[in-house]
Amino acid sequence: MFGAATPFPAAVDLSAIGRLVLAAFVAGIGVTASFSFLVLGVARASEFRAAGRPLSFVLYAVIAVVGLLGTVLAVYLAAEILTTNR
C-alpha cells in the first residue's frame, strides 16, 4: 500500500541521534554548572561582604559574574539555534 517498508535501522540515522543526545547532555551539564556558579558566587559574596572580608568578596563576585555570563551565553545560543533554519 505505501511501498516497501524499510527496516528500523535504515530509516533512522543513529549517528545523528547519538550526537543529539551527547549535545543535550553536555548542554544540560554546562547550563546547570554555570547557573550554580552564579548562585554560589552571589550567596558567598554577600556573606563575605557582610563579614568584612574584601578579598574573598571579590573572588566570589568574579565567580558570580562568570556564572552570569555563562548562563546568558547559554540562553543566547539556545535562542540562536532555535531561530536559525538549517
Image (tube, rainbow, N blue to C red):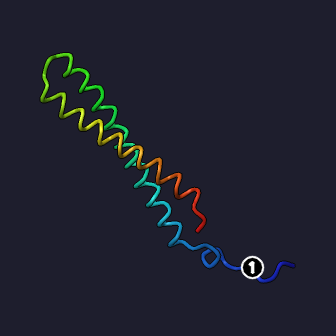
| Quarter location, residue 14 | bottom right
Q: Residue at x 12, y 29 (%)?
A: 55
**For residue 58, side relative to residue 11 (left or right):** left
**For residue 73, side relative to residue 16 (left or right):** left
Image vertical order of residue 26 relative to residue 13, above or below? above
Most foreground residue, 10 or 77: 77
Most foreground residue, 43 or 61: 61
* Residue type marked 1: Ala
**For residue 17, side relative to residue 29 (left or right):** right
- Where's residue 84, x and y in %? 57, 62
State the quadrant of the C terminus: bottom right
Most foreground residue, 16 or 77: 77
Q: Residue at x 29, y 35 (%)?
A: 64
SS of the residue at dot 1? loop
Q: Which residue is drawn at 50% across and 63% down?
A: 20
Image vertical order of residue 38 relative to residue 3, above or below? above
- Where's residue 16, x and y in %? 52, 70
Residue at the extreme bottom of the image, as rendered = 4
User: Can you identify the residue that label 1 sits on?
Assistant: 5
Most foreground residue, 16 or 74: 74
Residue at the extreme right of the image, as rendered = 1
Image vertical order of residue 50 relative to residue 76, above or below? above
Mark 1: few, some, or many residues within 10 Å (few <14, many ≥20)?
few
- Where's residue 48, x and y in %? 19, 22
Q: Which residue is drawn at 43% across and 49% down?
A: 74
